Image: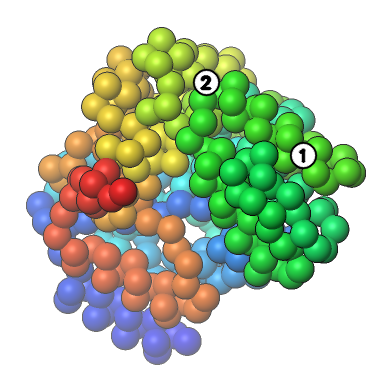
Amino acid sequence: MQIVDLFFRMASRLVAPTGADARLPIIFYHRVLDRRDPLRPDTPDVRLFDIHMSTLARLFTVVSLDQGLQALRAGTLAPRAVCVTFDDGYRDNIEAALPILRKHRLVATFFVASGFLGGGRMFVDTVIESVRRVPAGPLDLRWFGLGICRVDDAASRLAVIARLVADIKYRNLASREEACERVAALAGDPLPDDLMMTPEQVAALGRTGMSIGGHTAHHPILGCLGPREAKQEIEQDRDRLAAIVGSPPRFFAYPNGRYGRDFDHSHVAMVREAGFDGAVTTDVGCAASHSDPFLLPRQSPWQQSSLRLAAGITRSTRVKGDGRQAGALAAARP
C-alpha cells in the first residue's frame, strides 16, 4: 500500500494543476449508515466511509472550506487539496461520521436544515420509510397520478420511491407537507423521528472544530417559493444556527443545488445579502480561482475502492470549468 500511495502522489503531482490553475474538489455526503441499506443504495455505510476518509488522509490534503477557498484565491492551494461537506443535518453525521473523521484527523463542513432538528424528518425520509413498510403487492397511488404500482422487492420499492420523491420535492412547502402525510398514512406503523441531530448535537459538532453551514430551515427548492418565503427560509436558518453554535454560519448550501433549475441569481443575491461568505451547489466540477464564491461546484464520491476514489478526484481537477457550465446544462434539461 505504501508503494502504491507513493506512486499515486508522484503521478498526481505531475497531472494536477497548481498555482493560478489549481482546482479545489469539494465532495459531499448526506448520511453514513451503520450498514448498507438496499433502499439507499448510494449512501455509504461506516465501512465504505472509513475507506474514503482513509484514502483522503493518506493521499490528499483535507482542508476546511474557508482555508481552501482562501488558498485558491491566493494561488497557494496545497497539492491534492480537497474539502469534505455534508448536507441536511442527520444524526448519523455526529454518531457515525464524526468518529471516523476524528480518527483520521480530518475536518468537514456540515450544512444543516435547522427546521428538522430534534425530532423532525426530511420529506425524502418520509417517502423511503413509508414505502419500506408497505406490504408487498399492489400499491394504489392513483391519488398521486402514479396509478397502481407494485412493491414486490427492493428494486420495485426503489422505483416507487424515485417517482414519489421526484414529484414531492418540487412542491411548495404546504403542498409537500400534505403529500408527505398521505404517503406516511400508507405505512400503517409510526415512522422514525430520530433521524436528525438535536440542537445540542449540532452545537457539540461545532465544538469539535467542524464547521456548521446554512441549508435553509425546511429544505425547500428555493425556485418553488416566492421571494419573501425564500428569503425567510435562508435567514431563519441562519439565525437559528447562530443561536445554536454561537456565531453565524459562513457558508451556505442550496437545497438540491442545481443552478437554473433549483435556484437562480435572485437566490444567490439573497444568500449574499444574508451575510454568507460563499455557497455550494450540486453542479459537478471543481472550484477554481475565478469561481463565483456563491456558485461553488461539488461532487459526490460513489467509488467503492480507495484507488478509484483517488483517481476520480484527481481526474476531476483536470476538467476545465468550475461548475457553471454544468449548471447551465442542468437548467436546459427538460
Looking at the picture, tell me which residue is in the foreground, 146 or 2: 146
Res. 123 image quadrant: top right
Looking at the picture, tell me which residue is in the foreground, 229 or 59: 229
User: Which kind of residue does numbered mark 1 sit on?
Assistant: Ala
Q: Is residue 209 above or below residue 40?
A: above
Say which residue appears at 25% left-offset and 75% top-offset.
12
Answer with left or right where residue 183 lies relative to residue 271. right
Answer with left or right where residue 171 lies relative to residue 288. right
Q: Which residue is mark 2?
A: 237
Q: Is residue 178 above or below residue 314?
A: above
Say which residue appears at 59% left-offset and 26% top-offset.
175
Answer with left or right where residue 251 lies relative to residue 214. left
Could you classify mark 1 by the number of other residues whose Cα lies within 10 Å: few (under 14), some (14-19), or many (20 or more)? many
- Where residue 53 sits: x, y (%)? 52, 64
Q: Secondary structure at mark 2?
A: helix
Query: Which mark, residue 275?
Result: none
User: Which kind of residue does numbered mark 2 sit on?
Assistant: Asp
- Where residue 261 sits: x, y (%)? 33, 39
Say which residue appears at 31% left-offset and 54% top-offset.
284
Residue at the extreme top of the image, as rendered:
228
Q: Secondary structure at mark 1?
A: helix
Q: Which residue is mark 1?
A: 184
Could you classify mark 2 by the number of other residues whose Cα lies within 10 Å: few (under 14), some (14-19), or many (20 or more)? many
Q: Looking at the image, tell me whether mark 2 or mark 1 is earlier in sequence order.
A: 1
- Count of all numbered marks drawn on residues in the image: 2
Residue 23 visible? The answer is: yes
- Where residue 119 sits: x, y (%)? 76, 30
